[in-house]
Amino acid sequence: MFVALGSNLGDRARYLADARAAIDRIPGTHVLAASAIEETAPFGPVPQGPYLNQMLAVDTTLTPGALLAALLDIERNAGRTRTRRWGPRTLDLDVVAYVDGRAVNDTALTVPHPGLADRDFWQREVAELRAMLARVGEP
């Protein structure tokens, strides 16, 4: 799975580092590769500061829904509050796509993420990870 990390409040780099470590500690889950971190303009209509973004390739035995639940727990532990859609956040974690291209579409989760086509930085990060995985022989 490709998992996106983003932060635009507080110590953004620390939130990303802590999230990478927490994701790697999810039972049945291992971080295979991490893209470069890049700073991007906020996405959406709410005025706010720039984000640090990164994408991870993870191998997991969890279902996409179970992985999403674990990611939401990590967000909450990082102080994430959901008060305003598109608002600033300490940490934002999204299941973006399957490495092998599979799809999920249910009431709780859509994979690939519907925003993938609109976020050039996600597309760059996924391409970077695909190249890394190809070099080491991962799917």
Image (spheres, helix red, strand yellow):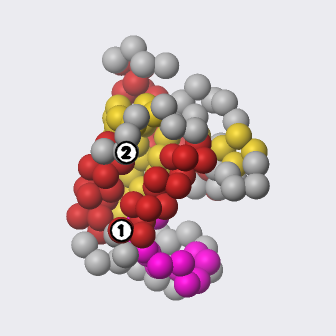
Q: Amino acid at mark 2?
A: Ile
Q: Please state the horizontal and vertical placement of residue 15, each as a whole percent of the image.
A: 29, 64
Q: Which SS does the magenta portion mostly show?
A: loop
Does the magenta portion include 61? no
Which percent across, then down, holds residue 82?
54, 78
Residue in the foreground of this view, choosing between 18 and 129: 18
- Identify the residue at horizontal 60%, vertical 47% (top origin): 65
In magenta, the rendered stretch is 80-94
Q: Residue furthest top?
A: 137
* Mark 1 Cα shell of 10 Å, populated few (<14), some (14-19), many (≥20): few
Give the labeled residue for mark 2.
Answer: 26
Q: Which residue is mark 1?
A: 77
Circle 1: residue type: Asn
Estimate the spatial distance between the alpha carbons at disc 1 and disc 2, rounded to whole Å.
Answer: 14 Å
What residue is drawn where x is 29% and y is 78%? 10
Q: Dot 2 lies on which element?
A: loop
